[in-house]
Structures are given as C-alpha cells and as structure tokens.
Image (cartoon, helix red, strand yellow):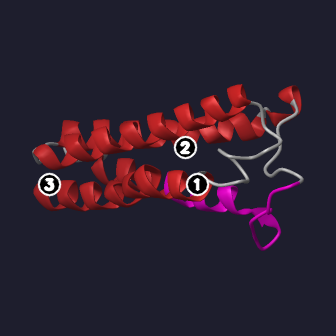
Amino acid sequence: MNEKRIKLARLLVTAPALFLAVVPPLVDFNSTHVTNPLWTGHARLHTVWLLSTNSIIAVLALGLMWRELKIASVRAGAVLTAAPLVGFFVAAATRSLYGGAFSDPNGVAQRIGFLDANLVIFGLWILVIFATFGLLWKVDR
C-alpha cells in the first residue's frame, strides 16, 4: 500500500514540476516579458534569472523523485516544486508594496473567468502538491 501511495504522489508532483520547467519560459520569452521594449535591461535580466532558476529547481525535483522510489525523495521533490509557486503567491500578495501587477499595459492579460490565469493555474498546482503531502502523511507513521 505504501509503495502505491509513493508512486501516486510522485506522479502527482511530476505534473506541476514539468509545467514549471517548460511552460513559463515558453510563455515569457516574448515581447510581453523578456524582450519587452518598455522594460530595462536589468528587469529583463531578473526575469531570465527567475525563469531559469525556477526551471532548474523543477528539473532537480524531477531528478530527485525519479532517481529512486523513496518517500523522502518524493517529499523533497514536492517541496522544491512548491517553492517557486509559493514565491509567486508572495509576489502576488505583496504587489501593492512595490507597484507590481499581473500584466503590463503593453501585454495581454490572461484571465480564467474573472481571475488572472497565473493565480488559477498556480493555485491548482499548489493544491496538487498539498494533496500529495496529504497522500504521504501516513505512509511512514
């Protein structure tokens, strides 16, 4: 039973980890972010830094989880995968302190219903990771 839970948990965390490794760089390497003509070179540097760091963290999480089937590896992979997502929510929650926004005037605001698409998608991934921790809660107890 425990091995099945660990395998399921690993599969659950794999989805948001793959997403973080691939989708944000594909979406943000364009004129609304990395090559935005209104952004300073320094802001672009920070964006590429953030995107590459988050992708590296996600790849490390995947490697850790898929190298061996151990609960500690899956938990560590889940924590690593959650870190960039939590960072996004910290930035979103504190955006009024530094003038942040979910989209730029020369960009396209992506929405799902009345919410910013990033809030919805990243929120779903966080829920998947929380579900994973719930699934693993009693495995070694």
> Is residue 27 something that shows in the picture?
yes
Query: Residue 2, labelled with which disc?
Result: 3
| Element carrying mark 3 | helix
User: Between tags 2 and 3, which lies in front?
Assistant: 2
Residue shown at 55%/60% (left/top)?
124
Between 32 and 15, the one nearer to me in the picture? 32
Q: Nearer the N terminus, badge 2 or badge 3?
A: 3
In front: 141, or 83?
83
**Residue situated in front as seen by the camera: 60 or 90:** 60
Mark 3 surroundings within 10 Å by alpha-carbon count, few (fewer than 14), some (14 through 19), many (20 or more): few
Q: Quadrant of the C terminus?
A: top left
How far across and how far down the image is residue 130, in percent? 45, 50
Q: Are marks 2 and 1 in contact (CB under 8 Å)?
A: yes
Q: How many marks?
A: 3
Q: Please report the residue visible at 63 percent of the width from the left and 41 percent of the height from the top.
A: 88
Instruction: Indicate whether 59 appears above or below 122.
Output: above
Name the residue type under label 3.
Asn
**Residue bounds of the magenta highlight:** 106-126
Q: Residue at x 79, y 32 (%)?
A: 94
For marks 1 and 3, the one nearer the N-term is 3
Which of the two discs, 2 and 1, labels the residue nearer the N terminus? 2
Q: Is residue 41 left or right of residue 1?
A: right
Disc 1 residue type (three-letter): Phe
Q: Please tell me whether residue 127 is drawn above or below residue 92 in the rendered image.
A: below
Is residue 91 left or right of 95 when viewed as pictured? left
State the mark number for residue 72: none
Residue 122 numbered mark, or none: 1
Local secondary structure at mark 1 = helix
